Amino acid sequence: MPSTTMPSTTEIEVPRGLKGVVVTETELGDVRGLEGFYRYRQYSAIDLAEQRTLEDVWHLMLLGELPDAPARAAFLARATPLRRLPDALRPLLPALAASTAHGGPLATLGAALSVAAADRGIRPLYDTAPEQRIEDALFATALVPTVLTALHRLQQGRQPVEPRDDLGYAANYLYMLTGEEPGPAEARAIEQYLISTVDHGFNASTFTARVIASTGADLVACLVGGLGALSGPLHGGAPSRALDTLDAIGTPDRIDGWIREHVLAGDRIMGFGHAVYRTEDPRSRMLRGVAESFGGELVDLAVQVETRVEAILAELKPGRELHTNVEFYAGVVMHLCGLPREMFTPTFAAARAIGWSANILEQAADPKIIRPAARYTGPAAPQPLPTA
């Protein structure tokens, strides 16, 4: 009987979860976990979040360079009209919104994008030229915030708010969500959050989008795959859960007891720890500063919880480097800017769609399909078929 471990092709042992395995080359960015640094192309992502606009970063990721003033104006003229809902999608949104409670906002967003892609006639990456791929990426990423906010408002029994051409990406997102023009502090805070989460190496959703892109599928199919991966609580679902932790603690006098109880029980403290960083997450550090610029009891509690979690973990789990990740202060910042918790992960998706699109475009230039192997560990084969 053949051995169940006999390889049919050459096998290469890799760690579970592909941890640390280099699967391709990229010019889009990387994460230096030991340094607490990550980049978008040749620039620090944090520098970009602190000094540039989301539109500038969008241009950088899709077109390869930061725009000067004329290039920025040309890019806005190209992308802004794409925010509007396609006519074919509008009558379908109420039914999609009604299904959100069952399928979740990211699944509903994926369905809406698929309809919009079919209406636009988006063709497989394999069959489209590079310039058309960029146009498709602009269309999809410009539409994501409009669809998300329209679906949310419809689910709340309110009518969608049309996008405004005079507002930037982040301000327009808040406007379409609330129906009111946001203050400059809130718009800039959300913009900084969005910029900081555009891309972050070969995370699960980015890798998923690139695997689909390697098949030559259309760009929106790749985005929908990324949305599916992002919907998982271990990837994109943590900002609201981190805020739930602060709610559960409630007041500063409960911090130590709550943390000790959950650490000793082996529970995961949401908003702490990262698969790559062994230092403080630079996104968390930046967003803590954004949160502190607003101030208030929630921010004070969050800072105290961060300090005590790290101290108690160092005491109870010595040798483990656990710090806040992006989700911890992201939830605080989004709450302070008026976003409901059910929109935290969708807002993350609005930013990450830009990074996914850039990765999809890069992957589309490589003709090699991503096709790893798995080791079979089931019963030995071939076995005789049982008698019917």
Image (tube, rainbow, N blue to C red):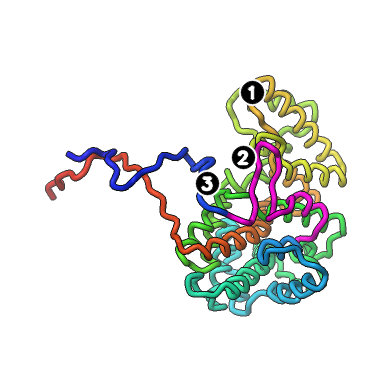
Mark 2, residue position: 276
Magenta stretch bounds: 26-54
In terms of image quadrants, where is residue 115? bottom right
| Nearer-N-terminus badge (2/3) | 3
The stretch drawn in magenta includes residue 97: no
Label 2 crowd (10 A; few <14 / some 14-19 / many >=20): some
Q: Nearer the viewer, residue 327 or 4?
A: 4
Q: Which mark is residue 319?
A: 1
Mark 3, residue position: 22
Q: Which amino acid does label 1 sit on?
A: Gly
Q: Which of 35 and 234 is in front in this view?
A: 35
* Secondary structure of residue under mark 2: loop
Q: Which amino acid does label 3 sit on?
A: Val
Label 3 crowd (10 A; few <14 / some 14-19 / many >=20): few
Q: Nearer the viewer, residue 310 or 345?
A: 310
137 vs 213, left or right, is: right
384 vs 217, left or right, is: left
* Secondary structure of residue under mark 1: loop
